[in-house]
Amino acid sequence: MIKEQRHNNHVAVRNSHIRTIFTLLLVTCIFSVPSAAISQTKHFPTHPVRLIVPLPAGGSTDILARVVAQKFSDGLGKSFIVDNRPGAGTSLGNELVARATPDGYTLLFASASIATNVPLYPKLPFHPIRDYTPIGTVGQSFYVLIVQPSLGVNSVQELITLAKAKPQLIQYASAGQGTITHMAVELFMMNAQIKMQNVPFKGGAPALIGFMSGEVPVIFSPIAESLPYFRNGTKVRPLAVTASKRVPDLPDVPTLAETGVPDSIVMSRTSILSAKGTPEDVVKILNTELNRFLQQPDTRERISSHGLIPAGGTPAELTEYLKMEIERWTKVVKTVGIKVE
């Protein structure tokens, strides 16, 4: 009887030890998974990163993306590869990143269309706030309202007066229906309470060429793209800029607010986004590196040469910008009744 009791006690102790060991192993496994993930995150990136450009190769956005990709590669020690995915008005590349694994290895080099497309295309399969994690802003640019001397106006108010006298008879060039150059004019017309006729071209460069040749008398053009014409003495008249204050390259040209048309600031931001759910540590690494190289003189010079003012900033600031842009352009689209085929 005593032997049996001793045997039972021995079994109980052994079972207790087994349960203790099993519990310790379980706890170790539970806590080791996050630790491994954190370790991998801290060493990000461990392999090449794709930077998706939703536009064709060779354009100014693509060239700028390659500058940024090289800077990331130099700073983080792994290749950042530009992957051009044009199509569907940037939607093809945008959706690719929205559906990518949220690990920071597939990034989007986004333009202003990421926000303006939301109200224009209600059935988009992605949303800038819902489906992306913001990384940071590369740069921002503004636009200048220019007219041909043949139009006979020397100020914004004279243009407004003429447009009210001849509604929809004055034509303006845009990069295409629903592009930022089209939306900028729609915002201006809404605030000035006038109507002009859109002449859409297949891109910003053809639109500017069409304007400079005299084919169309009015355009809202990116400042950097217009500067060479001003410096070469081309006889066109810059009337106002869409910035909140005068820009250094055109110090004598007033802002639209100064000319009596407030709330007409149009800014085009180039930014970097990742898929929703990208780890915070990865976002911090990418954002820190972006802000670091944006302060380098050679980077600032190269970005400025593409018409952008180097920006930087936090992911939270980029999110707020996107929210404000979506809200503003939604109001414009609804008020004016813009429809895109």
Image: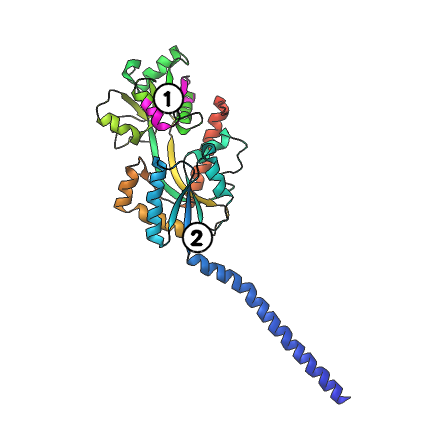
Q: Position of residue 76 (x, y in %)?
A: 36, 54
Decide if residue 301 is on the left or right side of residue 56: left
* Image height of 48 relative to 58, above or below: below
For the residue marked with disc 2, what is the amino acid?
Answer: Val
Q: Position of residue 293 (x, y in %)?
A: 31, 48
Of residues 57 and 169, the one nearer the viewer is: 57
* Image height of 274 relative to 197, above or below: below
- SS for callout 1: strand
Of residues 16 and 72, the one nearer the viewer is: 72
Mark 2 — residue?
Answer: 282
- Rate crowding at label 1 as few (under 14), some (14 to 19) or many (20 or more) other CA atoms within 10 Å: many
For the residue marked with disc 1, what is the amino acid?
Answer: Ala
Q: Earlier in the sequence, mark 2 or mark 1?
A: 1
Q: Residue at x 36, y 41 (%)?
A: 65
Of residues 74 and 275, the one nearer the viewer is: 74
Q: Looking at the image, is mark 2 or mark 1 nearer the viewer?
A: 1
The quarter in which the N terminus is drawn is bottom right
Q: Residue at x 29, y 14 (%)?
A: 150
Mark 1 — residue?
Answer: 173
Q: Position of residue 318 (x, y in %)?
A: 42, 41
Which disc is residue 286 wearing? none
- SS for callout 2: helix
Q: Kindly tell me whether residue 243 is visible in this rendering.
A: no
- Rate crowding at label 2 as few (under 14), some (14 to 19) or many (20 or more) other CA atoms within 10 Å: many
Q: The magenta stretch spans which residues?
A: 190-209
